[in-house]
Structure formats: structure tokens, C-alpha cells
Image (tube, grey):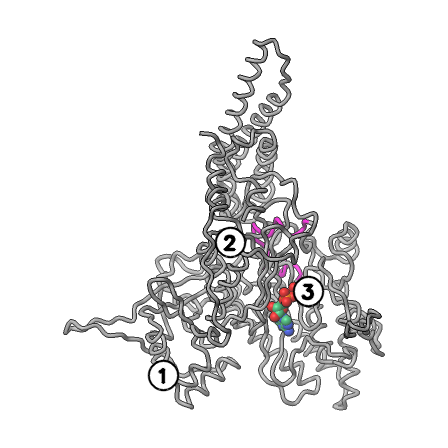
Amino acid sequence: MSGNDSREQAIFQITNREPTPVRKRKSLDKMWATDAFTLNKMEEALSKKAFKVMKSAMESGTAVDNDTAEAVAAAMKEWALSKGADFFSHIFYPMTGATAEKHDGFILSEANGKAITDFTGSLLIKGEPDGSSFPNGGIRQTNAARGYTAWDPTSTAYILETRNGSTLCIPSIFISWTGEALDKKVPLLRSNKAMNTAAQKVLKLAGEKNVATLNSSCGAEQEYFLVDANFANLRPDLLLAGRTLFGSDPAKGQEFDDHYFGAIQERVQVYMQAIEEKMYRLGIPAKTRHNEVAPGQFELAPYYEAANIAADHQQMTMTILKNTAKEHGFVCLLHEKPFAGINGSGKHVNWSVGNSTQGNLLDPGSKPNENLNFLLFCGAVIRGVHLHGPLLRAVIASAGNDHRLGANEAPPAILSVYLGSQIEGVFNQIAEGKLDGCDECGIMDLGLDQIIKFTKDAGDRNRTSPFAFTGNRFEFRAVGSEQSVAGPLIAMNTMLADSLNWIAAELESTIDGKSNAAIREGIIKVLKKLMKEHGQAVFGGDGYSAEWHKEAVEKRGLLNIPTTADALPHLKDANVVKMFEETGVLSPVELESRFEVYAEIYINKIAVESKLVVSMAKATIYPAATRYLSDLALAAASATEMGVDFDNATAKNIASNINGMMKAVAKLEKAIAKDSFKSEEEHMQFCANDIRGLMDEVRGYADALEGEVADDMWPLPTYQEMLFIK
Ligand code: ADP
Ligand code: MG
């Protein structure tokens, strides 16, 4: 059998595929949130008093008493039963970034042989999974493994339907018996609280009388690749590592930019519509869809929501993307870099903070120079990025994202902040101690009468910045496509809380008098000081350029942190530990445990990949290459016998690549066997420098072989096939 029989069969399957049966989807109002236990549904099912408690909890994070929990549990159960659910599950978000669930039946059997359904307030409030196998970074010993899940009333419960039945899903926190956070939701909720407390102080000092609870908001743009399952199933690397560990560049990649925003293929669009329908039913506001830069790459973004809800919804979205792909014969790759040499995938986390009284505090309005609240909050972000750039880098560090950051397609591994010309201009004035005016937005007038004139944005976009102001929010562009948004949101909320606390203390000692003029003068003074100390984090130029890398590090003292191995240790920096402790977001023990967990995940990922490189090189690529070499040898022998001149150059080249590959494999195997390290830090550095380097070395030879070996013998679906055949 020749090597590519399986590839040919895959192509046959794809080209003869019956299209997914299409049916007109229902109108939005018939789909919207039908499977979510929203406030609307609670209003119908609860007493006025209980509803008021829940509304306030969901909108402002206030407490829910036991009686209300009891009433909500009863109403939730009735609703879930009416939707056909017979099981419920606390859904939680362990530190791994995954979504975890343990299902329990509503069923209760009675002595008389009957079975009834049961769901009480206490079952709703608290669950106790034996979660001892979740990584806890040393917080729990397995002999003291008790962990609790507890209902988060501020996020919406929902029904998850499979073809065989439905489950009521209850968003929950996950904590240890000793009360330490073992998940991503607890610190996110705490970071919101810390941000609110600090923001209240600042706004009141700035002269605001009535200040409602502040919340952070998030809208996350999700990039992903789709590969036909017939191909993906032939690639152990895609199945186990989520990315290709081998594969040479196709003749055509993304150089024509013809995929970006191009017409969406019918099969893909049907998939996207199926995703959106599921999201709508769960009350997740899917808003945009388009083709991305790379062939086979796409993007989905929802309308933004409160950060805690957005984080839950984002986890659900990733699950839906993957599960729905299977129904459509695709595999959805959320990995940050599934294909070398082709654009990787990010998750732009759009973030702002606001409330019902002051609105969005990151909205500059038409006259930013007069909008002191905006200037205070934007200034706080600038200070945060400057002081905590390494933390922001650490929370987006992962084995996958290492392939993106620093490459010329994604934001650099140096954290700076882009403001756009108008806002940068205003802050430059502040740095000089004045604040006279600002650039106007201007009108777009094309001189074409039939095109209506419109107001331009005050600044252009900057795609090379890892952290960019985009008109009324910041966009953290360096987040990886596979990551939970909770980590970045926790870091951003906490650094904002920390900066607002600093600003509040400064304002208290600087503002001299109660008049508006005195307040304004005090604010400008404080912001001037802030810009003097932290203004070097602001950068509007080309973040990809070599000059910036030099300037950032040499002149501005910013850190260039290229790999996860370099980034994660910053979680232990004294100022990071202090900030998380002072704001009450993470205790030193909780923070330390996060370092341990992330380091372990990184090391394990590299271990899986390196073992795959060895096994694929030995058992898949080596046999194909040697078979072809033996064909060439036979051809050469027969040619010589016939007296025909035969050039052996190709055979020699192939032999040399085979030998090179196997030598590199041997080195890699030896490196993998090393198992004694002084610390996690040392182990991570070994992965980043030695193991990754050797993996690349093996790959270099293997990819060269792909270009030489007869195509009908090549055993792995090629980049060209995976990226272009749908
Ligand atoms: P682009 O690709 O141009 O950045 P998209 O429309 O794809 O824009 O995504 C922008 C994301 O930012 C959406 O999820 C949107 O809802 C979100 N967003 C808009 N305004 C805010 C805001 N004030 N706070 C947080 N997110 C926001
Ligand atoms: Mg964006």
C-alpha cells in the first residue's frame, strides 16, 4: 500500500461529502435565551421579594439569603424539568483554564419503590465534587482533598442538550475546604470587587456624588481554524497536541490576503450559523463572523457583557465551537499556532469598566481633555501596564502562545500601551502640566455627493500593539486563542484597582479645596506625576520593528519576555505578590499555586509534543523516506545496468536528511529522558531552550524530506490539503 492511500481516501470522502442538511433557523426572538434561566424567567417564577434579591445580586453582586436560594432552586428545577432535564451539574473553571462539570440526577428513590425529583436550596448553593485530581498547585494534599463548588448567582444557569437528554448547568466557583480559590472565577469576582472599591474612592474624590457599583465588561474576539476531520484524524499531532509538529509550507499561503474578510464558504457558513443558533439559545450574543488572515482561519465575536458572565460564555463558546465542528465533519483548532509559517490565532480581549451612573469610564467622549473621569481611569491603565507589564505577559504565557508572541504577526512580547493620536496628545499635554484642548475627530468627506459624510474616529488602529485603546475600551490583543479570558481580566481589573488606589491616595493629599477648579487642578497634578513616572509605557509606533525592541528595552526599561519559561516566574515578583494580597484578589499561597499549575501545564505540553515528534519521526516519516530511498536505489541500479546515466543527487540528499533527522531524534530522546531539575524554573528553561530547539531540528529535516519524497508515498496530509480542501 502506498503512503498516501489514506490521504486519497480522505480527499474522496471530503469531495463526496453530503452537505450538512440545512434548515431555516428560527427568528432571533424564538431562539434567544430559550435555554437560559434569565432574570426574565425568574421574574415570572419568583415572588416579588425573591426576584428583587436576585436582580440586585445579578446587577450589583449583593448577597442572596437562604430563603431566596430555596425559592430559586425550586423555580430552577421546575424550569429545567419542563425543558426535559433530569440531571443538574455545577459547572466550574479549574486553574487549567478548562471547564469542568460533575453531573447529579434530580432523582430520589423512596422506600415505597417510587422515584421523585428533588433539588433543594442547599444542593443549588453547594456541591462537593471529589476534585482531588484537579491541579491545585500544592494547596491541597490528596489526603485532604475536600473541595466545594458553590453557585454563582450572578451568572446565568442554562440547559445543555445532547441528542439523548438535557442537563441543568449551574455556573459555580471552586474552592478548597480551607477556603482557597482553586479556580478562575473566584479571583475574577474578587478583582471586580477590588476595582469597584478603588473606583468609588477616586470618583468621589473627583467630585461625583452618586456612584453606582462599577463592573468590568469584556467582549472577546475568538480566532480559530477549521480542518476537515478526515485529514485531522490522520495527523496524530493535530489530535494530541492541537498543532502540526511537521509540515512544509504550501506553495500558496496567505501572501495574497485573499482569505481575509473574503466570501465565507457555504460549508463553513452553515457551521457558523449552527454555532450562532446554539449560542443564541444559551443567551450568548454572537455578533460578528468573518474569514481571518490565514486560509482556513475564522473569527467569531460576541457583543460584550459583564466580565464574569462574558468569561463563562467564552468558555461555553469554545466548547460549542469544538463540539459543533464534529457534527459538520470539521475539527476546530483553537491552538495559537496550528500551522508554522501561517498566521496564528489570538483572542482579543476587549475590556472596559463602568456603571449606571457615570457610564463607561473609558469612553473619552468628544472632548477627552474635559473628561476628567476618563483621564483618571485611562491614566490608571497606563500606570498599570507600566508597573505590571511582566504580569500581563505572564497571564498570557502558554506553550501555544509562545509561537505567536514575538513573531511578526502578533503583538510583541514587550508590553506597552497604544492610545491613538488624540488621547496620546492629551496625555502628552498633561505630562507638561497643561490641558488646553485636543485634536478634533474630523469629518470623512470623499467629495462624492452620493456617499454620506461621517465623523472619523479620533485615532487610527494599531495592530502591532499588544494593548491598544480602541475608542471606548482597551483591547488586550496578545491573549492566546485557547486561553480562558479570566486570567487576563483578573490581571487587568487588579492592576486597575491598584492604580486607582494609588491615584486616590495622591488625590487626597493633592486636591486643595472643594471647588471644581481645585479638583481639576489636583487631578492634572496627579496625572502629571503619573505620566512622569509611567509615561514610557505609552507607544504609538510599529511594535514589530527592531528599533522599538531596542528602544523599549534600552531607553525605556521595559522588559522583553520571549517565552513562557521567562514569563511565569514574574508571578512571583514581590510587587505582584503585594498587589494581589493588598487588593484581596489572591493570597500569596493562591498566587504561588497558580505559578505551580501553569508551570506544570507548560512542562507537560512540551513533554507531549516532544514525544510525538519522536514517534512521528521514527514510525511515520522515517519509513516513508526510506521506502522512497530504496525505490531510488533500485532505479539507479537498473539504470546503471542499462548503461543509462543516473544522477544520485536526490538519493544522497534524502539519505542525508534521513540521517540528520534520526541523529536529531536521538538527541531529543536523550533530552526527554532528563528528569532531575532543581526547580520548576530550571525545568521550564530546559523545555524552552533545549527541547524546543531539538524539536525544531527534527522538524527541519522532516520538512525537507516532505519536499523530496514522492507525494504518493507521503503519509501525512499536507498543509496544502488541510488548509485549502474543504
Ligand atoms: P474589531 O475586530 O474591529 O476589534 P469586533 O467587532 O470584531 O471588532 O470586536 C470588538 C469586540 O469589542 C466586540 O466583542 C464588542 O462587543 C466589544 N466591545 C465593544 N465595546 C466594548 C466596551 N465598551 N467594553 C468591552 N468590550 C467592548
Ligand atoms: Mg478587535
Q: Residue at x 45, y 58 (%)?
A: 21
What is the spatial separation of the Cα atoms under label 3 and label 2, in whole angstroms?
33 Å
Q: Quick check: marks 1 and 2 in contact, CB under 8 Å?
A: no
Residue at the disc numbered 3: 385
Given the image, on which type of amino acid does mark 3 rest?
Answer: Val
**Residue 626 position within the rendered picture, expressed as x and y whole percent measured from the top left:** 52, 25
What is the spatial separation of the Cα atoms under label 1 and label 3, in whole angstroms?
44 Å
Secondary structure type for disc 2:
strand
Q: Quick check: marks 1 and 3 in contact, CB under 8 Å?
A: no
Can the viewer see residue 452 in this picture? yes
| In the image, farthest residue toward the left | 112
Secondary structure type for disc 1:
helix
Extent of the magenta region: 389-407
Q: Which mark is in front, 3 or 2? A: 2
636 is within the stretch colored magenta: no
Q: Which mark is in front, 1 or 2? A: 2
Answer few, some or many: residues within 10 Å of disc 2's Cα (few below 14, many 20 plus, some between 14 and 19): many
**Residue 388 position within the rendered picture, expressed as x and y whole percent measured from the top left:** 66, 63
Q: Residue at x 47, y 35 (%)?
A: 5
Q: Nearer the viewer, residue 629 or 670?
A: 629
Residue at the disc numbered 2: 332
Residue at the disc numbered 1: 71
Can the viewer see residue 577 in this picture? no
| Ligand 1 found in image quarter | bottom right
